[in-house]
Image: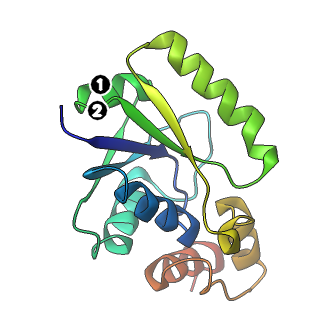
């Protein structure tokens, strides 16, 4: 079986924190698939196609990264891609309870799939897509948090510029 991990999430939008985790995962795995979840229970700013395009542009220099989207259970998607590992990020202790609960649920749904938690660089540990969207909507420059194409897309959506 190829040494491949699936980094599943909403990525609305992708941040430098997400990219840091992708790079960390590439040190462990031969390939990382960034899988954008089509989560109908969340109200997303960007469409699936927009998020996939932003991630592809943001990770274009990372040779062993593939970007895809999926509907349904992450564990089913992981198995369909020939992997056994889900990557999840833990920024702060506040993330742990939710992520731990999800990992245990996934383990019950599929004993063959493991969740691996990675921590981003400390300089990204406070970043969240929600916080970045809020900052842009208030006119802040978020260039140190997201790639230029993402900041431009955020401004276009949130400031109608």
- Residue displayed at 75% across by 76% down: 135
Tell me which corner region of the image, top left, top right, bottom left or bottom right, holds residue 157. bottom right
Residue 33, position in %: x, y?
31, 48
The quarter of the image holding the N terminus is top left
Front one among 87 and 129 = 87
In the displayed structure image, the side of residue 109 where residue 141 appears, left or right: right
Between 140 and 5, the one nearer to me in the picture: 5
Q: Tell me the tag on residue 79.
A: 1
Q: Position of residue 93 (x, y in %)?
A: 80, 47
Q: Is residue 65 above or below residue 106?
A: below
For the residues labelled 1 and 2, the Cα–Cα distance comes to 5 Å
Is disc 1 in contact with disc 2, using a CB cutoff of under 8 Å?
yes
Image location (x, y in percent) of residue 133: 68, 68
Q: Can residue 72 be seen in this view?
A: no
In the rendered image, the vertical position of residue 16 relative to residue 144, given as above or below: above
Q: In percent of the image, x 54 and y 81: which residue is there?
A: 151
How crowded is the residue under tag 1: few (<14 C-alpha within 10 Å), some, or many (20+)? some
User: Which residue is disc 2 drawn over?
Assistant: 83
**Pick the front one: 55 or 83:** 83
Viewer-proximal residue, 15 or 113?
113
- Colour scheme of this structure image? rainbow
Residue under the point 48% across and 12% down: 109
At which x and y percent is residue 31?
26, 51
Q: Indicate the secondary structure of the residue bearing disc 1.
A: helix
Q: Tell me if 25 is positioned left or right of 154 in this view.
A: left
Residue lying farthest to the front in this orientation = 28
In which quadrant is the C terminus drawn? bottom right
Q: Check residue 127 in the rendering and tell me which mark sits there, or answer none.
A: none
Question: What is the residue that sits farthest to the left in this orientation?
Answer: 1
């Amino acid at each position: 079986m190829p040494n491949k991990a699936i980094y599943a999430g909403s990525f609305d939008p992708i941040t430098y924190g997400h990219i840091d985790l992708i790079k960390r995962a590439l040190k462990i795995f031969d390939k990382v698939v960034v899988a954008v979840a089509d989560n109908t229970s969340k109200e997303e700013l960007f469409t699936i196609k927009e998020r996939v395009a932003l991630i592809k542009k943001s990770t274009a220099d990372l040779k062993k990264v593939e970007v895809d989207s999926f509907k349904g259970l992450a564990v089913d998607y992981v198995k369909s891609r020939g992997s056994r590992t889900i990557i999840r990020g833990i920024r702060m202790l506040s993330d742990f309870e939710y992520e731990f609960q999800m990992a245990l649920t996934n383990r019950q749904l599929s004993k063959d799939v493991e969740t691996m938690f990675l921590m981003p660089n400390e300089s990204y540990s406070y970043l969240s897509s929600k916080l970045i969207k809020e900052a842009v909507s208030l006119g802040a420059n978020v260039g140190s948090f997201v790639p230029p194409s993402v900041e431009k897309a955020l401004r276009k959506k949130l400031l109608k510029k």
